[in-house]
Amino acid sequence: MTIAATRPLIGITSRPREDPENPNWTMTDDHYAASVADAGGIPVALPFTIPFGFDATSLVPDIVRRLDGILFTGGGDIADCSFGGNAYAPESHSPISLTCAARDAFEWALMRACWDADVPVLGICRGMQVMNVTLGGTLVRDISDYPTKTIVHSRLDQPDTPVHHVRVAETSRLAKILGFTSGEVNSLHHEAICKQAPEGHVVAWAEDGTPEGLEFSEKTFFLGVQWHPEKLRTQPQLFSAFVDAAREHGAAEREAQESSL
């Protein structure tokens, strides 16, 4: 098998299992792994914490060196104490839920390391929000904090059904990948980007103006969407582009290592 054909290793972040009888369990949705595998990658689940006091963030440098791309997944809200206490816009006061400071700390370290090493990243829902706040942006705690936001975005009853329209900037990388500038998506969130990260570009919006896509053009592949394409299963091109970028990154890293021997 040639280097170009090698299936890249794609890390998939996990979330806590809300089960008091098994507090040390973490989990991922199989839709993420299936989408990565269908696109030609090998999915690798990444637990954010390990019992008995082991700090999983200590593994981040090795994770970034050994994996070819990272998929940051959806999940609960970011804790108030995380990201230096600066994740949320000061004018946003709605309650948050299902927070996990250990996950926040791990994903902050992992996102920052991916940025520094230019490891390809795809952020989905919470993953896009983590991307934004790690790199200096802020969030609103709840879209309802802003009366101009007229769409119900938290449609947990219809996880695999398109429920609202999105507009994608014509010149964006996201539009080139998706092959459209106007489409329908599912929606499973109540938080959203408020201030975009200084080096980021919001490139997709819902009809009420809520940010739905974020990209960083100076990186090889650093892109996020607010919807859940892994549940729709109608946008394989997004995962294909991500896995292709990870494959190229991995091949370049291996070539550099071999040339240094």
Image (cartoon, helix red, strand yellow):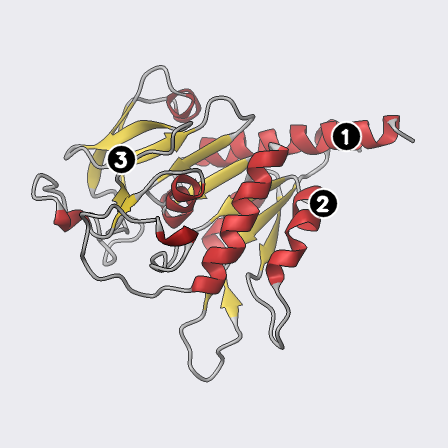
- Give neighbour class at mark 1: few <14, some 14-19, many 20+ (Cα, 10 Å): some
- Residue located 62% across and 41% down the image: 41
- Give neighbour class at mark 3: few <14, some 14-19, many 20+ (Cα, 10 Å): many
Dot placed on the residue nearer the N-terminal end, 1 or 2 = 1
Q: Residue 88, how many percent across, how many down? A: 29, 49
| The C terminus, quarter of image | top right
Mark 1, secondary structure of its residue: helix
79 relative position to 56: left or right:
left
Of the two numbered discs 1 and 2 in the rendering, the one whose residue sits closer to the viewer: 2
- Residue located 40% across and 73% down the image: 18
161 relative position to 133: left or right:
left
Dot placed on the residue nearer the N-terminal end, 2 or 3 = 2
Residue extending furthest top? 171
Give the amino acid type for the residue marked by disc 1 in the picture: Ile
Residue extending furthest bottom? 21
- Residue located 83% across and 32% down the image: 257
Label 2 and label 3: CA atoms lie apart by 32 Å
Whether 13 is drawn above or below 218: the answer is below
Whether 205 is drawn above or below 169: the answer is below
Q: Which residue is mark 1?
A: 3
Circles 3, 1 touching at the beta carbon (< 8 Å) = no
